[in-house]
Image: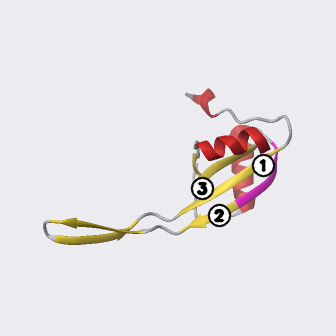
């Protein structure tokens, strides 16, 4: 669980899953593709053919308060999109 933060369950990822058998996860920003592949294969027992990663820098956020404007930054995240072999499926709801 140090590498995988959580699976992404959005409409766009659901369409990728249905059409191309791809799943998306939020991962540790320091993890590489080899570590991500090993973690997912160990946790879910599937075979992965490809891992694609992307990094998103957190946005600057500003809000106005009584004491004046407060600025900060949203967290930086790294996403991984993995492609599974044909016929394999990850069931996120089986562990609930």
Would you call the spot at circle 2 few (<14 residues within 10 Å), some (14-19), or many (20 or more)?
few
Residue 25 forms part of the magenta stretch:
no
Q: Which residue is mark 1?
A: 83
Q: Are marks 1 and 3 in contact (CB under 8 Å)?
A: no
Please report the residue visible at 78 percent of the width from the left and 44 percent of the height from the top: 20
* Left or right relative to 17: residue 7: left
Q: Which is more N-terminal, label 2 or label 3?
A: 3
Q: Kindly identify the residue that appears in the image at 60 percent across and 42 percent down.
A: 11
Q: What separation in Å lies between label 2 and label 1 (alpha carbons)?
A: 15 Å
Q: Measuring from the top left, give residue 75's x and y in whole percent.
A: 45, 63
Residue drawn at x 47%, y 67% as measured from the top left: 58
Hey, which residue is sitting farthest right in the picture?
Answer: 86
Select label 1 or label 3 by which is in front: 1
Q: Residue 6, how many percent across, how many down?
A: 56, 46
Judge left or right: residue 17 versus residue 87: left
Q: Which residues are magenta?
A: 47-52
Mark 3: few/some/many CA within 10 Å (<14, 14-19, 20+): many
Whether the residues at callouts 2 and 1 have beta carbons within 8 Å, the answer is no
Secondary element at tag 1: strand
Residue linked to disc 2: 54
Q: Quadrant of residue 3?
A: bottom right
Q: Residue at 62% across / 27% down in the picture?
A: 94
Residue 22 shows up from this direction = yes
Furthest residue toward left: 66
Between residue 51 and residue 71, name the one nearer to us. Answer: 71
Depicted 31 relative to depicted 8: above or below: below
The quarter of the rendered structure image containing the C terminus is: top right
Decide if residue 4 is on the left or right side of residue 20: left
Task: Find numbered disc 2 in the image and state the secondary structure of the residue it sits on.
Answer: strand
């Amino acid at each position: 669980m140090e590498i995988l933060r959580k699976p992404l369950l959005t409409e766009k990822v659901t369409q990728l899953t249905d059409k191309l058998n791809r799943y998306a996860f939020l991962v540790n920003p320091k993890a590489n593709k080899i570590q991500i592949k090993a973690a997912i294969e160990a946790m879910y027992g599937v075979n992965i053919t490809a891992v694609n990663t992307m990094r998103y820098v957190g946005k600057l956020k500003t809000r106005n308060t009584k004491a004046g404007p407060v600025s900060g930054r949203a967290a930086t995240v790294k996403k991984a999109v993995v492609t599974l072999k044909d016929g394999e499926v990850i069931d996120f709801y089986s562990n609930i």
